[in-house]
Image (spheres, helix red, strand yellow):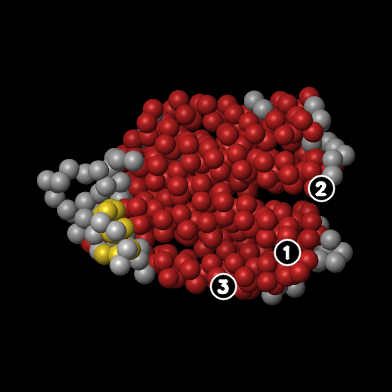
Amino acid sequence: GFLNLSSTGVAVGRRQIHYAWVIVAIAATMGFVTSSVRFAAAALVPFLSSASGFGWSYAAISLAFSIQWLVLGIMSPYVGWLGDRYGTRRLLLLGAILFIAGMLLTGTMTKLWQFYLYFGVLLGIASTIFTVLLVSSVTLWFRRYLGVAMGAVWSFQGLGTMAFIFLIGAAFNDLGIKWIFWLPGIVGGALILLLIRFFYNEPADIGLRQWGAPDDEPIRSMQNNEVAKVRTHVFLKQAQKTNAFWNLVGIHFWGCAGHNIILILLVAMMTFNGHSKGVAVAVFITLMVVSTITRFAAPVLADRFGSKVVMIFVFSAQTFPLLLLIVSQELSAYFTFAVLFGIGMGGEMTAFPIINRQYYGDAPTATTYGWQMAGAGIGMAIGPVLGGFLKDWTDTYVWSLWLSFG
């Protein structure tokens, strides 16, 4: 046939494609399905708080998002550690089961505690598994072109978020809360289970070298054996003695605390300042579209030119445009902000696997990335809570914007 899947890769006609690119396609598809829940669910807030929905307060609903981010923060180091020791595939299976269960149960919720447990905890653990391990496992397959591979995985996560926002906006009134969660839960969950069958932890599992490795390099397994357990333990102890290890955790914490204030509060801020909800959603979607493009571009550029210069640029783009909203509430200012901030936010998250490769080489970096995601998760949880508190306290969003800037 035209398309033949083998253990060494995919033959498309006569052209042989290294299996590393199959892994990228699998990881990107899984990310498309699972990341949407974490970022797009903010679009559900008006439906959950309305009288025709559950009538829950904004603070009560926001707590569910914070629980999910705290779960990411607490669980990421353990998930990364388990992935390095025992391989990714088993944990992806657990993640798929938790994802399906969490989506089905969230669709049946009637009480606030169920929202916290099903959406916050169950889906929080599931998406932690996919967030940490899909990214770190792809790095094991590439010696060259890791930036392109990472860009593909990250940008598909952004597309998944936009697809779920579109589903909520277009079909919520027809489907209701049950099928808004059940449809992606059942279809997406089944797709993930199918793809796990074609997923391998590392090239050595099917007798391959990394993409871009020399042909004379010996094939060696780096996961799921006694050597891997010792390597993971020793590497983590050594890495944690360096300033760079903790600095990268801190950078991810501050970056995520800063941008999640905006992601959670932007639509509410615009409606508070007199803009319609439809226009506010359009600005938010603009931000997400731009961030999807830079999710692809940032790792490619970091791989090519070094991570530091790219990180300086994207953090600047995530910081200084906030001054626009402090001085102006005009619609043009919001759209300009969405483009500039989207460039920064999309790039900030996606360069970390490239940094890890440039710092640590082929060391077991799922654990390291897990610690970095712990910083990210706690930052994502704390930022909006403090931003919301400042809004309630001062009855203006100016101090929330200054907090994000700071």
Q: Please provide percent x and percent y for residue 258.
A: 63, 37
Q: CA distance from mark 2 to mark 3?
A: 30 Å
Q: Quadrant of the C terminus?
A: top right
88 in relation to 145, above or below: below
Q: Secondary structure at mark 3?
A: helix
Which badge, 2 or 1, comes first in the chain's sequence? 1
Q: Is residue 2 left or right of residue 265?
A: left
Q: Please provide percent x and percent y for residue 278.
A: 80, 48
**Where does label 2 land, which residue?**
277
- What's under tag 2, amino acid-wise? Lys
- What's under tag 1, amino acid-wise? Ala
Q: Residues within 10 Å of mark 1 (few under 14, many from 20)?
A: few
Q: Is residue 10 left or right of residue 406?
A: left
**Where does label 1 land, which residue?**
171
Q: Please provide percent x and percent y for residue 344.
A: 57, 33
- What label sits on residue 186 in the rendered view? 3
Q: Is residue 364 visible?
A: no
Q: How many marks?
A: 3
Q: CA distance from mark 3 to mark 1?
A: 17 Å
86 in relation to 132, above or below: below
Kindly report which numbered mark, 2 or 1, lies closer to the viewer in this rendering.
1
